[in-house]
Amino acid sequence: MKLRSLTIAIVVGIFALLIVGTNAYGWVSVHRSMLLLNRDRPAPPATAVFVPKKSPVAISLLANIDELANLSRLVTPASQHQQASQAINKWKQQLGDRLHLDYQREIAPWLGEEITVAITDLDYDDLPQNGSQTGYLAVLSSRNPQVSSQKIQDWWDKQVESNRLTFESYQGVKIAYNRRDKLASAIVVDKYIIFANHPKVLREAINNLQTPNLNILSNPDYQQVLAANNHHKVGVGYARFPELKHWLGKEAGDKYPVAGINVGVDRQGLIADISLYPIAFDKNSIDPELIPTQPKLVNTLKYLPRQSKIAIAGTDLANWQQQLITLLPELKPQIPFLDNNLARIDQQIGIDLAQDIFSWTTGEYALAVIPNPNQNITDWAFIAERTQPDRVDASIAHFDELAGLAGYNVGLLPWQDKQVIGWTKLATDTTANTARLIAQVSGVHTTIAKYTILASSLEAIDMTFKAIDKQSILESDRYRAGANLLTATESGYLYGNWRTISRLLPKQFREQPVVKLVSDGILSGLPNISISSSTEAGVQLVTLLFQVD
């Protein structure tokens, strides 16, 4: 059995179960599934008592699969019911296939509210001649012990008939092992069905149950992950990156060795809270005065039009870029910041936006992708606080010089009551009955208050002017709907629609199997994504909110 792939499947499945078209305005107050929205934060996963304290990865689903599936159907538009049903049924089948069980006949009748999967050890047998033997564990809770015991016993009997099963007894628990499929299984205290890729992994799991200080619930790092706040939690995950370097890359975990994720559902959609803990993190040594009590809103969001397809804001963009590369060094060549539209000035006059603009953006900033109201193209606008006025002015003057050398006319373009510098070229307009000369604008910039604004067109910069007058993204229904769950703090904020964001990603990244599974699943029904990041006492916090159109 490939329990390693089951670990990945559970991660994706936590999202995939809430997979398609969640209609935030169609929630109803009936059916047991709706209790998921109103329950208190659940207790620590009971199934985690089998996971060893040293486990590098542990992931738990904290809600019954069929209840989550019912919830998805209740809130999914009728036109998408078939798609939702197919996606969820596919995930159920994958779960059954990994365990060599038929989900509908042998799992569904008894499956409870918890599934935990874990990597227990990177080498469970410690025998050099065998190489590294990674231990994998899956624990399923039962809501009907009598039914689950009978189903598993019937399953064992079928395998005995084909001479594929051997048994052993350990601490009063019968362990069955299928050497061909490398699948060990056991029924523990009637309410837990546990699976592993070797009996030794199951024996250790039974020890963890009987000796509390051996299981992961006694791990301080895991306790910290569980304590993280999350709305209506339905999933929790924990990982120690340094032990996974042979899978993630040699630099994994160098700065943030421990990560946790808490996934929950809310009337606005799906929420994922991710925490990255630094080296030598000690929550008891935190100075309370260092923890912000009220996040500060990014003022530059006031300049981003409510029509923005993508909105990014925060402070110290230069430092943010370096942090991103530090967190994801192996993805450095795959993380695009600009698509072809955003890079037009770069291509036309030779400006390196990342080096020539972002490097001096140490204060507040904002970047928006905006639909042009007069043309079928995408515009952009970039707003940066003038924390280093002399450096900013020198850079802008250099841009004007490069534009002139590239053949553009650089000069004032009166626009309403604002003074805007534009880069223009004369072109022939042949769309009218008679040909006429028009001035094509390839870039504009201006200064308002303490901010410098650059944009790809007059229309784009005009929309930033209008945004200040109660037409910004802060006034949009989408932002307001999620404001109580996710605050646009000065540490970093992103809002976007997946269809727009995906066009910015390299093709080879979009076509990764896990990316495609999530994209075709949750992101097809919850396409609007908001991300907020902040830092508290050295802990990097990221919250993701997935909403409907």
Image: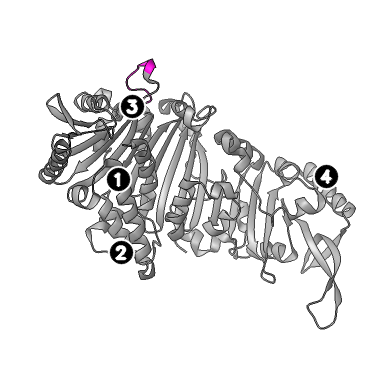
Q: Residue at x 73, y 46 (%)?
A: 353
First in residue order: circle 3 vs circle 4 = 3
Name the residue carrying label 3. 219
Report if the CB atoms under discs 2 and 3 are less than 8 Å apart.
no
In the rendering, at what x and y percent does residue 13 appear? 36, 48
Element type at marker 1? helix
Give the structural element (helix, strand or loop) at label 2. helix
What colour scheme has been applied to the protein in the rendered image? one colour
Q: What's the distance in space between the residues labelled 2 and 1, CA to CA? A: 27 Å
Front label number (1 vs 3)? 1
* Disc 4: which residue: 394
- Magenta segment range? 122-129
Report x, y in % for residue 200. Answer: 25, 24
Q: What distance separates the C-alpha of mark 2 from that of mark 3?
A: 38 Å
- Which badge, 1 or 4, is on the more N-terminal residue? 1
Which numbered dot is residue 97? 1
Q: Earlier in the sequence, mark 2 or mark 1?
A: 2
Q: CA distance from mark 1 to mark 4?
A: 63 Å
